[in-house]
């Protein structure tokens, strides 16, 4: 049994063909990073237009590489929630049309559950039940995952996602887009103790929620007092992104590195702290993580250390399965095997459903 999976929740147009043995026959990801770089973040309208241009070539190439015809597929799976409305619509419309044309069932995928399923694929063996942490540009959520089909949301961000905070802070510091890798690079030479930054909600043991917008603002105020434009914001009008750092004499490189390191450490403290609280509360002994921020070296090191101390099995997928991809849509096979298929009139659900 083979399925085609489609992923267009944010700014990656992706498709894959996966077998019921979880063998990946083909996987194609068309990134839009270059398109959004100049804006320092994903522009939804541009993202959906780019999906429209790329979706059919990406699917065509995926099927060709896999050597399968649409009619031979057991299903077409597509991520329908959560994500950017325009982006989700492109993927779902394509999936519906192909499913109808080929006469095969349609299976909807929850993008966040799929991020956790990437750990099942990476491990090559069962990972459920587990605690799942997803930290990406759009989401920061903690799940109790009973099975591949049964997830309880334990907590999530009440404002910005962790990756979004990385992107905005990198922009503020003139470090470029995407912000996560840029902050990580700058932080390598920095002293995290050089700035004192808040860890919102970390000490509140009654909640598994996250909050990153106050931390983002705190960084902004370290750069310049409220009301005053930061040197980086002033410079933006005169210089191209990426050149700002070396051109700004008022902020020595070391100071920027210290602030990047302090910010990165604060985010990681929050992510690790709440994840450990989730493990304590659930008593589960497997931890699965996913999303672009899971690529962060400090986060990986700290979680590896914490998992070791608690004798918890930690599953971190390789980078290509952490960032958005269609392979993780293989979670649809679990739904298909359990007898679930979706109707052709299903809709997208852009917001996060608290379940
Ligand atoms: O999962 P993903 O590829 O797309 C979304 O669904 O959002 O995640 C992208 C996010 C971006 O915000 C990016 O800055 C962040 O992941 N990211 C990182 C790192 N690499 C990517 N954040 C921290 N450290 C990294 N090394
Ligand atoms: Zn994602």
Image (cartoon, grey):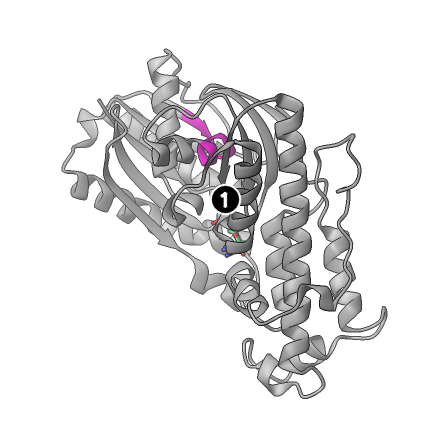
Measured from the top left, where is residue 161 in percent x and y?
Answer: 63, 47
Q: Is residue 99 left or right of residue 234?
A: left
Majority secondary structure of magenta residues: helix
Measured from the top left, where is residue 148 in percent x and y?
Answer: 44, 22
Rendered position, 115 above or below 130? below
Residue count near mark 1 (Cα–Cα under 10 Å), binned few <14, some 14–19, many ≥20: many
Total numbered badges shown on the rendered structure: 1
Please report the residue visible at 72 percent of the width from the left and 40 percent of the height from the top.
158
Residue 282 seen in the figure: yes
Measured from the top left, where is residue 63 in percent x and y?
Answer: 21, 39
Measured from the top left, where is residue 76 in percent x and y?
Answer: 32, 28
Q: Quadrant of the C terminus?
A: top right
Q: Is mark 1 within 8 Å of ligand 1?
A: yes
The front one of 62 and 343 is 62
Residue 94 seen in the figure: no
Q: Secondary structure at mark 1?
A: loop
Range shown magenta: 108-116
Q: Is residue 344 magenta?
A: no
Q: In the displayed orientation, state which residue is furthest to the top.
A: 339
The front one of 107 and 138 is 138
Please report the residue visible at 67 percent of the width from the left and 81 percent of the height from the top.
235
Q: Quadrant of residue 75?
A: top left
Please report the residue visible at 62 percent of the width from the left and 70 percent of the height from the top.
190
Rendered position, 86 above or below 178? above
The front one of 164 and 246 is 246
Q: Is residue 33 left or right of residue 168?
A: left
* Residue on which the image places disc 1: 291
Q: Quadrant of the N terminus?
A: top left
Please report the residue visible at 44 percent of the width from the left and 28 percent of the height from the top.
109
Q: Is residue 343 left or right of residue 26?
A: right
């Amino acid at each position: 049994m083979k399925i085609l999976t489609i992923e267009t929740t944010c700014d990656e147009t992706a498709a894959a063909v996966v077998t019921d043995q979880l063998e990946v026959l083909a996987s194609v990801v068309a990134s839009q990073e270059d398109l959004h770089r100049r804006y320092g973040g994903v522009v939804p309208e541009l993202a959906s237009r780019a999906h429209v241009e790329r979706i059919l070539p990406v699917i065509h190439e995926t099927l060709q590489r896999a050597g399968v015809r649409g009619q031979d597929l057991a299903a077409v799976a597509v991520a329908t929630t959560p994500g950017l409305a325009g982006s989700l619509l492109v993927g779902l419309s394509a999936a519906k049309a192909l499913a109808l044309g080929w006469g095969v069932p349609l299976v909807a995928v929850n993008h966040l559950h799929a991020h956790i399923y990437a750990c099942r694929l990476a491990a090559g063996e069962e990972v459920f039940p587990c605690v799942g942490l997803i930290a990406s540009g759009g989401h920061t959520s903690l799940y109790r995952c009973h099975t591949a089909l049964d997830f309880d949301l334990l907590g999530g961000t009440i404002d910005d996602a962790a990756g979004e905070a990385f992107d905005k802070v990198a922009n503020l510091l003139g470090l470029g887009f995407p912000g996560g890798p840029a902050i990580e690079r700058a932080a390598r030479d920095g002293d995290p103790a050089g700035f004192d930054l808040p860890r919102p909600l970390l000490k509140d043991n009654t909640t598994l929620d996250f909050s990153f917008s106050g931390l983002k603002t705190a960084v902004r105020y370290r750069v310049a007092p409220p009301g005053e434009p930061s040197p980086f914001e002033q410079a933006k009008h005169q210089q191209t992104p990426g050149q700002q750092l070396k051109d700004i004499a008022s902020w020595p490189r070391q100071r920027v590195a210290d602030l990047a390191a302090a910010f990165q450490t604060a985010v990681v403290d929050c992510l690790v702290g709440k994840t450990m609280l989730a493990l304590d509360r659930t008593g589960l002994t497997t931890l699965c993580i996913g999303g672009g921020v899971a690529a962060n070296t400090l986060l990986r090191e700290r979680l590896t250390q914490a998992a070791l101390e608690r004798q918890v099995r930690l599953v971190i997928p390789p980078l290509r399965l952490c960032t958005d991809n269609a392979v993780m849509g293989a979670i649809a096979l679990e739904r298909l095997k359990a007898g679930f298929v979706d109707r052709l009139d299903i809709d997208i659900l852009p917001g996060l459903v608290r379940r």
